[in-house]
Amino acid sequence: MSPSRRLLVLALGLAVALAAALLLGPSGLKPDQVWHALLNPSSADTAARIVWDARLPRVFLAFVVGAALSVAGAVMQGFFQNPLAESSIIGVSAGAYLGATIAIVTGLSRIGPWVSLPASAFIGALAAVMVVYTLARRGGTTPVPTLLLTGIAIGSLCSAIASLIMIRAQRGDMDLVVFWMLGSLANRGWTEVAIITPYVAVATVLAVVFARYLDVLSLGDEQAAYLGLPVRRVRIGFIVLAALLAAAAVSVTGIIGFVGLVVPHICRLLFGARHRVLIPTAAVVGMIVLAWADVVANVSGEIPVGIVTAALGSPFFLWLLRQRELHRT
């Protein structure tokens, strides 16, 4: 697909997802009401307030979080050199969830929402992924089965610790922690969009700038080192970027699984495997996918969007595992 056609398809997909998010919901709005509301943001009209105070920030948050999770997944699959890596599978989301839980229960999140909660989630995510990566290494490589089992173990440990903290927390803090477990975009506003957008934007730009290093890593560590790439430093840099992206998403929405696993594969099928193209297209497709998942969650009675992505992503994950087994036989 040519670059111009690719841009047109992605732009059209974003526009359709935005229109669906603004039109569909518990409060039925007609297209002319939405259009009038968009042209009159300061209006006290009910439709204007629904659009500007509820639906627009929600869909923009879906865009930012979808981009963060998808880019994190593409980066992880690149530097781990396997297609099964994803933040919720290898423990990053659980680590970020633990960090956010500690920040909520200890009151750290009240000090400054712009820094404290994302920073706590980032520290938890980075610690989890570093432990998984270190324990999964075998002779200079990262075997897929070892990676998955280690990620499940570390993720379960982080979730167990967070659950223990939650049990001993106060009622109000417990409700907030449960929110993180389910993953939701409900009751989020422009503040949450503003909090995580700088983190996601900076990390995504850096991932695109250094995307060619992921292409080199795909040749194998020995070949990458022979070509002059400082493999260890590059891997650590990408781990930090992926952890920052996942932590930023988790810090405001909770755990939303499978987006980072599914979207990079869709983009590889449609646009190729070169990371200079894969990362930005994954960001846009992630926006579209999570926006549509949230529309489904919204019109289905305000169920957590994490349930929708898990219901859609789990069959894809099983299919992917099946395809890999078929290729080996």
Image (cartoon, helix red, strand yellow):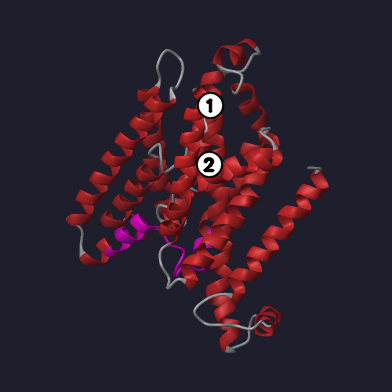
Viewer-closest of 205 and 214: 214
Q: Quadrant of residue 228?
A: top right
In the orientation shown, which residue stands out farthest toward the left?
Answer: 168
Frontmost residue, 221 versus 121? 221
Q: Name the dominant secondary structure of the magenta segment.
A: helix
Q: Residues within 10 Å of mark 2 (few under 14, many from 20)?
A: many
State which mark lies toward you, 2 or 1. Answer: 1
**Which residue corresponds to the image point at 49% horizontal and 79% vertical from the top-left?**
26
The magenta stretch spans residue 181: yes
Q: Residue at x 40, y 34 (%)?
A: 129
The front one of 78 and 307 is 307
Within 10 Å of the Cα at label 1, are there few (<14), some (14-19), or many (20+) other Cα atoms? few
Residue 55, located in which quarter of the rendered image? bottom right
Image x and y of residue 138, in percent: 40, 16
Which three-letter amino acid code belongs to the residue tagged 1? His
Residue 314, horizontal then vertical, whole percent: 43, 47
CA–CA distance in space, label 2 to label 1: 26 Å
Contact (Cβ within 8 Å) of mark 2 with mark 1: no
Q: Amino acid at mark 2?
A: Ala
Q: Position of residue 182 (x, y in %)?
A: 36, 58
* Residue 249 in magenta stretch: no
Which part of the image, by quadrant, shows the N terminus? top right
Decide if residue 85 is on the left or right side of residue 226.
left
Q: Earlier in the sequence, mark 2 or mark 1?
A: 2
Q: Would you say residue 115 is visible in this rendering?
A: no
Pointer 2 residue: 72
- Secondary structure under the numbered disc 2 in the rendered image: helix
Q: Which residues are magenta?
A: 175-194
Q: Which disc number belongs to residue 327?
A: 1
Helix, strand, or loop for circle 1?
A: helix
Say which mark, if any, is on residue 298: none
